[in-house]
């Protein structure tokens, strides 16, 4: 696929089916991520790949997070949380592995770099004909989830990338005109 077409036309896909991306496709995804802009070469990235039983374990963690927030939660809501990761045959959690107190590379820059890595993976998925959806929900910011995924004190989850085969057609692209976003100082 032509690079500019990819950049102009990438789109998310919420409906995802198996099989999960294969080893070669995943390798291409991670290689794209590892080319994210990275101030001072901190490589502030960590990825956790969930599939099969791993998705069930992530679902348990989501349910535990819900329960800790609200011990009176009903079973149906707990079950809904448990099922969330099953919306795709694979999820990759993209984590900003943050080194604190660096004068030249504040936390924000490290988190942005991890966000760029996530976007590169979204692009690499689209370029390979895979479906992908970047989700955070409230779980990305939840203490129980952070602990369960062994995040360091300053780390952040920038997203859960849901990945699989296209389960539907891509939606129409929104029409956006650069002139509505760009200011020029000539
Ligand atoms: C950091 C981040 C978090 C997101 N979290 C969610 C989410 O939890 N649930 C959701 O439906 N969409 C979420 N989105 C939006 C979708 O991934 C997607 O970008 C949006 O539906 C627009 O579709 P498009 O990517 O095809 O333009 C998130 C996007 C970003 C960048």
Image (spheres, helix red, strand yellow):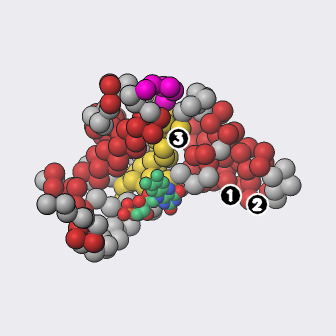
**Nearer the observer, disc 3 or disc 1?**
3
The span picked out in magenta is 98-103
Verify whether residue 16 appears in magenta: no
- On the rendered image, what quadrant is the C terminus found in? bottom left
Query: Which residue does the numbered mark 1 point to in the structure image?
Result: 80
Is 100 drawn above or below residue 83 in the view shown?
Answer: above
Quadrant housing residue 61: top right
Whether the magenta-drawn stretch holds residue 101 is answered as yes
Label 1 close to label 2 by CB (< 8 Å): yes
The residue wearing badge 3 is 157
- Which residue reaches farthest front? 186
- The mark that comes first in sequence, 3 or 1, is 1
Pointer 2 residue: 76
What residue sits 76% from the left and 60% below the top? Answer: 76
Where is residue 50 shown, x and y percent of the image?
A: 51, 39
Of residues 132 and 25, the one nearer the viewer is 132
Dividing the image into four equal quarters, which quarter contains ligand 1?
bottom left
Q: Is residue 59 left or right of residue 108?
A: right
């Amino acid at each position: 696929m032509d690079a500019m077409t990819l950049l102009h036309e990438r789109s998310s896909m919420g409906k995802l089916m198996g099989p999960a991306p294969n080893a070669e496709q995943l390798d291409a995804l991670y290689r794209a991520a590892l080319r994210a802009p990275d101030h001072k070469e901190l490589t502030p990235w960590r990825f956790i790949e969930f599939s099969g039983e791993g998705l069930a374990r992530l679902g348990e963690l989501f349910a535990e997070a819900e329960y800790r927030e609200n011990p009176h939660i009903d079973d149906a809501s707990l079950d809904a949380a448990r099922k969330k990761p099953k919306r795709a045959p694979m999820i990759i959690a993209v984590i900003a592995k943050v080194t604190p107190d660096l004068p030249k590379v504040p936390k924000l820059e490290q988190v942005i770099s991890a966000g760029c890595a996530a976007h590169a993976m979204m692009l690499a998925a689209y370029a390979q004909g895979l479906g992908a959806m970047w989700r955070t929900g409230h779980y990305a910011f939840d203490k129980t989830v952070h602990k369960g995924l062994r995040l360091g004190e300053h780390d952040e989850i920038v997203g859960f990338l849901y990945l699989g085969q296209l389960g539907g057609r891509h939606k129409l692209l929104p029409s956006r005109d650069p002139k509505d976003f760009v200011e020029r100082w000539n």
